[in-house]
Image (spheres, rainbow, N blue to C red):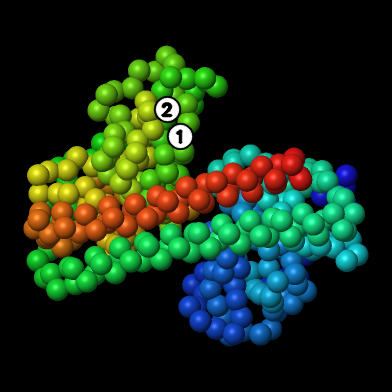
Amino acid sequence: MLSFNEIFADSTKHCKKIKTDEYHETGKNMIVDQGQSEIAGYTDLEEGLFSDVPAIIFGDHTRIIKYVDKPFFIGADGVKVLKSKLEKANYRYLYYALKNVKIPNTGYNRHFKWLKETIFNYPNSDRQQEIVLILDKLQSIITHIRTQLEKLDLLVKSRFVEMFKDVKDFVPLSFYINSLLAGKSLAGEESCKNKVLKTEAVSYNYFDNSQVKNLPNKYIPLEEHRVNDGDVIISRMNTSELVGAAAYVWEAPANTFLPDRLWKANLNEEANPIFIWQLLIQQTTKDEMKKIASGTSGSMKNISKSGLLGIKVIKIAFDAQTQFANFVKQVDQSKSILQQELTQTQTLFNSLMQEYFG
């Protein structure tokens, strides 16, 4: 067993930081930040390029761990660059060891202090390589499945554009949505009858029914706050990247209710819920959401009901909405099969991570 400080050195001071407004879509060198994407952007700059790779990135605010094996610049905020003090270190092994660390989520605060308190299993080099080969194989399968899921999402987006690209008639979103309803977000005991959705349940524009937490037994939620199959849920408060995220509830978890940061859309007879979900996650709609989002604290943004309902969107006849929704349902059947495979592989991966590093 070795401590964090015995294994790692903080090399952040040796890296040149690039401001977000200086990121480009293409360039000679990549920029790595603390966000979800492996590569945040590119730059043509050369001076200050960090070339002592491989290295490991830790997102001080996000707790995200990344393995980087090509020269890079870093984003301007919240990035820690870790190098090993050990000779001939297996960086893939160290990457997986760090990913297994359970760091408490304290919001948009710094989390590096928690990471520095960690003690790591550190077997001999042959055993490390054996573990890496197994985990890399499973990670490759997971990545492949996720790629297939992304392609199916692109297929749906392409179909949306194909069907509605020539529409010139626009209406406010209130043409489809009568009202927006939010609930309560309360911390519950370990064993509770009722659950409440986490914001993450819709953060990536697809409903994740595993993202729930307990509601206190003494709290009696309103029935109108219950999450049901067929609901359209919208994130009214989230990070600047994820605010306005929306999802269609294919399968609602039992006894689960709305939190205060999510809305349920009360649709009128002119709206097919699957179509509305897809309308909300179109890039043009999301761009409009970003324009009306106001700052709260840190990087969090908030959208008002009046602001969202006032956004202009295309006016589509109900029959055409239904035709598109049926196509989405067909694609989702394929996604469900892939999602099952992904869940099984991810479960095995998580189990082995716990076995190797727990």
Q: How many marks?
A: 2
Residue 292 percent across, percent down from the top left:
29, 57
The kind of secondary structure element at disc 2 is strand
Q: Taking 121 as reference, is 160 left or right?
A: left
Quick check: 339 left or right of 35? left
Percent position of residue 308, x then y: 24, 51
In this image, 174 relative to 2: left or right? left
Mark 2 sits on what residue? Answer: 195
Tell me: residue 88, above or below residue 351.
Answer: below
Q: Amino acid at mark 2?
A: Lys
Report the residue at 38% width, 45% height from top.
207
Which disc is residue 212 wearing? 1
Crowding near pointer 2: few (<14 within 10 Å), some, many (20+)? many
Residue at x 91% of width, y 64% of height: 87
**Among the two numbered marks 1 and 2 on one chain, the one whose residue lies closer to the N terminus:** 2
Question: Which quadrant of the rendered structure holds the C terminus?
Answer: top right
Quadrant that contains the N terminus: top right
Q: Residues within 10 Å of mark 1 (few under 14, many from 20)?
A: many
Horizontally, residue 17 falls left or right of residue 144, namely: right
Measure the alpha-carbon separation of dots 1 and 2: 6 Å
Q: Is residue 282 visible?
A: yes
Evaluate whether residue 85 shows in this view: no
Q: Position of residue 302 (x, y in %)?
A: 36, 48
